[in-house]
Amino acid sequence: DAKTTQPNSMESNEEEPVHLPCNHSTISGTDYIHWYRQLPSQGPEYVIHGLTSNVNNRMASLAIAEDRKSSTLILHRATLRDAAVYYCILRVPRGTSYGKLTFGQGTILTVHP
Amino acid sequence: EPEVTQTPSHQVTQMGQEVILRCVPISNHLYFYWYRQILGQKVEFLVSFYNNEISEKSEIFDDQFSVERPDGSNFTLKIRSTKLEDSAMYFCASSDAVRSGNTIYFGEGSWLTVV
């Protein structure tokens, strides 16, 4: 599996934007970039995914570098409920391994009131 | 919103005992998974299951582990003879397809403590 690198931790203030970076320099041309998060004492939760173009949904935005070697998850206005571990995961597009998510250590996001 | 439900939320068992963790995946989903997370460590893939058979398993998923879909709604993980190192949070997950953009939905987890 292609590897991702994320900062161990980041901090933000409530209602400010948060930019969570992820490096994936060995990404292949068909790997999708997925983001999941894990709130305290809960299971992982899907946030967003993309391939080449930037993506927006109700939770966040995903900005993907032109060379696809990095991406940034953007929370436009952080709330206290966004405090979680955020995982950047690369997924192959098909095959039996497709269902397997390989979690790294992720980025622990702390949101201050 | 549909969700994956797991029972029990917490189970304490003695070493060597058998444990069954139960999951009800989202109703129209066809792909089922178990992951585990030892306290303070990463979430680890255990097994994926489709069409009544295992499609992939990790090295962790040895002969002590088994999965079953006994009926149309439940998906279970059995640990035959628990060890201390099996203490972890076990997450069940499901998805409707194996596509590039499909979402995997996780349950809240079952916390297993082996004493």
Image: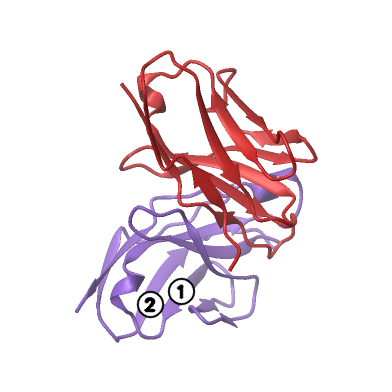
Circle number at residue A19: 2
Please tell me whether residue A51 is drawn above or below residue B19 in the rendered image: below
Q: Determine the image quadrant of residue B57.
A: top right
> Which lettered chain is shown in red?
B
Q: Chain of mark 1?
A: A
Amino acid under disc 1: Leu
Q: Are marks 2 and 1 in contact (CB under 8 Å)?
A: yes
Residue B56: horizontal and vertical position, in percent?
A: 68, 36
Question: Could you tell me which quadrant the N terminus of chain B lies in?
Answer: bottom right
Residue at the (64%, 30%) spot, across then down: B67
In the picture, residue B65 is in which quadrant? top right
Chain rendered purple? A
Query: For the residue labelled by badge 2, is the local secondary structure a helix, a strand or a loop?
Result: strand
The residue pinned by badge 1 equals A73
Whether residue B62 is visible to the viewer of this picture, yes or no, is yes
| Residue at far top of view | B16
Residue placed most toward the observer, A42 or A68: A42
* Kind of residue sitting beneath label 2: His
Graded by Cα atoms within 10 Å as few (under 14), some (14 to 19) or many (20 or more), the crowding at tag 2 reads some
Q: Chain of mark 2?
A: A
Q: In this rendered view, identify the residue nearer to me: A16 or B52.
A: B52
Front in this rendered view, residue B110 or A84: B110
Residue A26 at least partly seen = no
Cα distance, mark 2 to mark 1?
A: 6 Å
Position of A56 with respect to B16 (left or right) is right
